């Protein structure tokens, strides 16, 4: 973490249940898979309340050349043709990083009802070599979810140290 980053800018991590921790750690492991294949280190997994894993995905920007191949958007593309909105509304999407505005939009359209994420967008900006207070045109995923007519519960940041490990040295200094 950049020593110049005022601590007050960094969102406070939340505690997770054992179950949420288990699946978020799986998403973080998928981020490491993404990185090992030359992509940005992001992973996501979708799970039903009974523990059924619907599917998982990792960032494949470098592998595919597709700038929209983020983990969460790729996961929604895999799920949406196969599962109805009533099923997806029961699902939790675990993402190693806070969803960007595109991925939040994909989650919005999918009707997935709950999101748990690891490292937040502010800490990610610091890893990318940007200032923590550099807001760009960036909407928070919570801004997008708040516009949804269906409730989308959003939990995070969580397991920040573990989620950050995937990013150490993964972005050019
Ligand atoms: Zn994204």
Image (cartoon, rainbow, N blue to C red):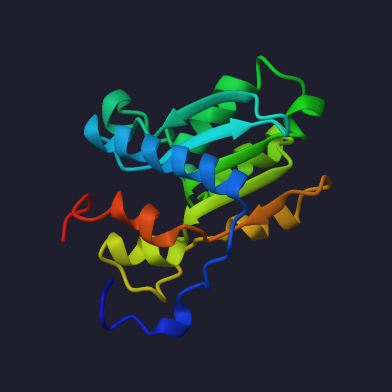
The answer to whether residue 128 is seen in the rendering is: yes
Q: Is residue 173 above or below residue 30?
A: below
Left/right of residue 118 with respect to residue 126 in the rendered view:
right
Residue at 57%, 60% (x, y): give it.
140
Q: Nearer the viewer, residue 68 or 173?
A: 173
Q: Position of residue 123 (x, y in %)?
A: 39, 65
In which quarter of the view is residue 161 placed? bottom left
Residue at the left extreme of this rendering:
173
In which quarter of the view is residue 93 placed? top right
Residue at 45%, 37% (x, y): give it.
26
Q: Is residue 134 above or below residue 60?
A: below
The quadrant of the image that shows the N terminus is bottom left
Q: Is residue 41 above or below residue 38?
A: below
Q: Position of residue 114 (x, y in %)?
A: 69, 45
The quadrant of the image that shows the C terminus is bottom left
Left/right of residue 74 with respect to residue 108 in the rendered view:
left
The answer to whether residue 38 is seen in the rendering is: no
């Amino acid at each position: 973490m950049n020593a110049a980053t005022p601590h007050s800018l960094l969102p406070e991590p939340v505690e997770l249940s054992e179950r949420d921790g288990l699946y978020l750690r799986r998403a973080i492991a998928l981020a490491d898979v993404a990185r090992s294949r030359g992509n940005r280190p992001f992973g996501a997994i979708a799970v039903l309340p009974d523990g059924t894993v619907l599917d998982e995905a990792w960032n494949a920007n470098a592998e595919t050349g597709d700038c929209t191949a983020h983990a969460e958007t790729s996961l929604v593309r895999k799920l949406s043709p196969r599962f109805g909105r009533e099923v997806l509304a029961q699902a939790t999407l675990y993402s190693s990083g806070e969803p960007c505005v595109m991925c939040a939009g994909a989650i919005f359209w999918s009707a997935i009802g709950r999101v748990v994420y690891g490292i937040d967008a502010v800490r990610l900006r610091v890893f990318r070599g940007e200032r923590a207070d550099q807001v760009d045109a960036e909407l928070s995923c919570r801004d997008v979810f708040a516009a949804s007519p269906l409730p989308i519960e959003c939990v995070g940041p969580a397991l920040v140290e573990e989620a950050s490990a995937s990013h150490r040295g993964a972005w050019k200094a």
